[in-house]
Image (spheres, rainbow, N blue to C red):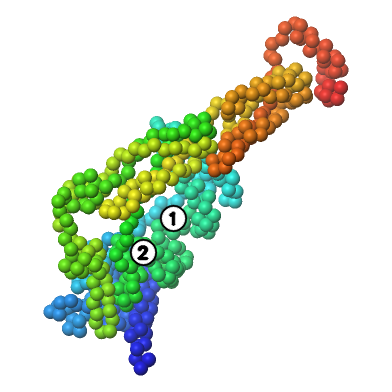
Amino acid sequence: MAARLLQPVAARVKLCSDLAKDLRGWIAASQHQVLSTESSVRGPEAHLHTRCGDERDAQCSYEMPTPNRDSGSGRQDGWHRATSGLGGQWRHCSTSGRAFGAPGGVRHFHATGTGVKLAPKKDFYEVLGVKKGASTSELKKAYHKLAKQFHPDINKDDPSASKKFQEVQQAYDVLKDDEKRNMYDQLGPDGFQQAESGGMPGGGFQGGPGMGGFDMGGFGFDFRQGGGGGFEDLFGNMFNMGGRGQRGPIMGPTVQVQITLDFMDAVKGTERDISYEAPARCRTCSGTGLPPGEKPVTCKDCKGSGRIQQGGRGVMMEYLCPTCQGTGTIVKNHCRTCAGEGVELQVKRTRIKIPAGIDTGQEMKLVGQGGEAPGKAPPGDLVVIVAVMEHPVFKRQGYDIHVEASVSMTQAALGAKVRVPTLTGDVLLKVPEGTEAGDQTVMRGKGIKHIRQDRYGNEFVHFHVVTPKKLTSRQRQLLEDLSKEFGEREGDHQSEERAASG
């Protein structure tokens, strides 16, 4: 009895295994430019066909048994063939015609670059101008420097600056993340680019979105959520393994805005009114995608569920409704304003509070103020990327600032008090006796406020000793007398040492 119960399960597992094996065989065959191959898969009937010409025309189709809803068509055993086209490196796209599993069903996939070789990716380390083993602080320093240099708001007359800024931003986003950086170092620029687009070179894609843990023999496939499902759905539909049901609410897109701040505004914090373009629910149809007054019609085939179930030969199949594409409704007419999309590009305005201490390259996320999605889906986020202008006096380094203070020869030798600028106003600073050019002193707590902590950085004062270029006769005489006092003689390289020790 138990053996009889396990027979259908074993048959399903074998069919799944054989299909995966034939898919791997097709991939290997297509790499060698095979003109035609066919291999049978046990089930009631399932075939894999490939016709691979040159690199631009690589195509593949497979046939699998699907049940006939119309007994007057197809094979007499209650099954017919459902054919699907495949391209070299697959990415799921929207269904054309009818979905897999329906009578005459076709589910299309297309290559993410079939026949188009991606341009070599720029090396992220070269983009930032650092070595491969650069530390996190070195990466951050290089990024801040380049972000200031190429920020679009500073280079409004140079269209190439915006592209360069995006390259710098992308490189830093990857390299600052330890996990992404490790993958980038292992795969290299081109391999990482391929992995990002859905194909993991040189290793199986296990447990990724839509794959359900399938390892396709060293080839990665990007069957991500959206458009009707991926390989997990394909096998799920065949063997009633669950797959994905109707898609739940999605989130609107994230919108990025770049702003430039004055140095002191960034130090002290400020508020800023910004405007930006973002997808927003259509004002004509309120996001329904329908003309005003119209309502979607419930799909008769799936009765609004978006899924259809059929059984035959002991196998229960559930697949996406080919009539409504899983939405459960039929739309006959579309809103003319948004062409049925439910959203249109609109200008949004908001006032943002900028915290004290923010620096170039730092981001602020405003939850729910990004792009909107059709229907009742929640809006995405607004991400504000900051660039801070340089100051003529203060030089920023993290939360510390650096300034130069000029002192005369006598002030440096005798000591004095000089006026030094700080972020809150000028202060009197004591110059120690015997100060030399390049010496520095620290005023603790006079730097920039930490953005997330209630403490401040320091101010470093660098002394610059000024030598007079023009002297009165009396000044010259006094300096000559001082030189004699120190025992200095013309051409004596040790005179400075005697003066210092004297």
* Residue at figure coordinates x 35%, y 62% from the top left: 225
* Residue at figure coordinates x 18%, y 81% from the top left: 75
Q: Is residue 170 left or right of residue 458?
A: left
Crowd band around label 2 with a 10 angstrom C-alpha radius: few (<14), some (14–19), many (20+): many
**Residue 53 percent location from the top left of the image:** 31, 65
Mark 2 element type: loop
Q: Which residue sits furthest bottom?
A: 1
Q: Earlier in the sequence, mark 2 or mark 1?
A: 1
Q: CA distance from mark 2 to mark 1?
A: 17 Å
* Residue at figure coordinates x 75%, y 9% from the top left: 475
Q: Count the marks.
A: 2
Crowd band around label 1 with a 10 angstrom C-alpha radius: few (<14), some (14–19), many (20+): some
Q: Is residue 260 left or right of residue 94?
A: right
**Residue 168 percent location from the top left of the image:** 48, 44
**Residue 15 percent location from the top left of the image:** 34, 80
Q: Which residue corresponds to mark 2? A: 223
Query: Can residue 436 be seen?
Result: yes
Q: Which mark is residue 193?
A: 1
Q: Eyeballing the image, is 439 above or below 359?
A: above
Which of discs 2 and 1 lies nearer the camera? The answer is 2
Mark 1 element type: helix
Q: Eyeballing the image, is 375 above or below 311?
A: above
Q: Amino acid at mark 1?
A: Gln
Between residues 348 and 127, which one lies in front from this camera angle? 348
Q: Is residue 105 left or right of residue 255?
A: left
Between residues 104 and 52, which one lies in front from this camera angle? 104
Q: Eyeballing the image, is 471 above or below 461?
A: above
**Image quadrant where residue 401 sits:** top right
Q: Which mark is residue 75?
A: none
Q: Amino acid at mark 2?
A: Phe
Q: Which residue sits furthest top?
A: 473
Q: Eyeballing the image, is 275 above or below 380?
A: above
